[in-house]
Image: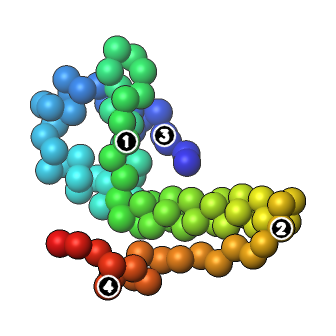
Amino acid sequence: MRVDTNDLISVTNANKAGISRLVNDAAEGKTIGILRNSEVAAFIIGPEQAARLSRIDEIEEDDYMDSYHQKFGGEYVRKDIEDDEDELIL
């Protein structure tokens, strides 16, 4: 994930800027890094970036499970949460 150093903001300045402005910036595609004690403590990202990161996580998990099962045998079949809807207790 690439972050422009101009999109890094301290917690203090983030409070001054207001969450609405930061959310609007993220919705427009900016990735905003929130600094605490000069270190990145959190990121605010838009929905497209979040979806992209989720897809990357799924690919990495699939690759890991494929290599695990190639090494130790068996077949890996991805199971989505929708597959378990009937088993969820509300």
- In the image, what residue occupies the spot 55% across and 48% down? 1
Residues tagged 2 and 3 counted as in contact (Cβ below 8 A):
no
Q: Between 26 and 81, which is closer to the camera in this rendering?
A: 81
Q: Residue at label 1?
A: 43
Q: Residues within 10 Å of mark 2 (few under 14, many from 20)?
A: few
Of helix, strand and loop, which one carries label 2?
loop
Q: Measure the C-alpha gap from mark 2 to mark 1.
A: 39 Å
Residues tagged 4 and 1 counted as in contact (Cβ below 8 A):
no
Q: Measure the C-alpha gap from mark 4 to mark 1.
A: 35 Å
Q: Residue at label 3?
A: 4
Q: Quadrant of residue 34?
A: top left
Q: Which quarter of the figure is the C terminus placed in?
A: bottom left
Q: Is residue 56 visible?
A: no
Of helix, strand and loop, which one carries label 1?
strand
Q: Measure the C-alpha gap from mark 3 to mark 4.
A: 44 Å
Q: Quadrant of residue 55?
A: bottom right
Q: Single out the mark in the foreground, 3 or 1.
A: 1
Q: Residues within 10 Å of mark 3 (few under 14, many from 20)?
A: few
Of helix, strand and loop, which one carries label 3?
loop
Residue type at mark 4 is Asp
Of helix, strand and loop, which one carries label 4?
helix
Q: Position of residue 46 (x, y in %)?
A: 35, 59
Q: Single out the mark in the foreground, 3 or 4.
A: 4
Q: How many marks?
A: 4
Q: Residue at label 4?
A: 86
Establish if 34 lies above or below 48: above
Q: Single out the mark in the foreground, 2 or 3.
A: 2
- In the image, what residue occupies the spot 15% across and 31% down? 15
Establish if 13 lies above or below 51: above
Q: Measure the C-alpha gap from mark 2 to mark 3.
A: 44 Å
Q: Residue at label 2?
A: 73
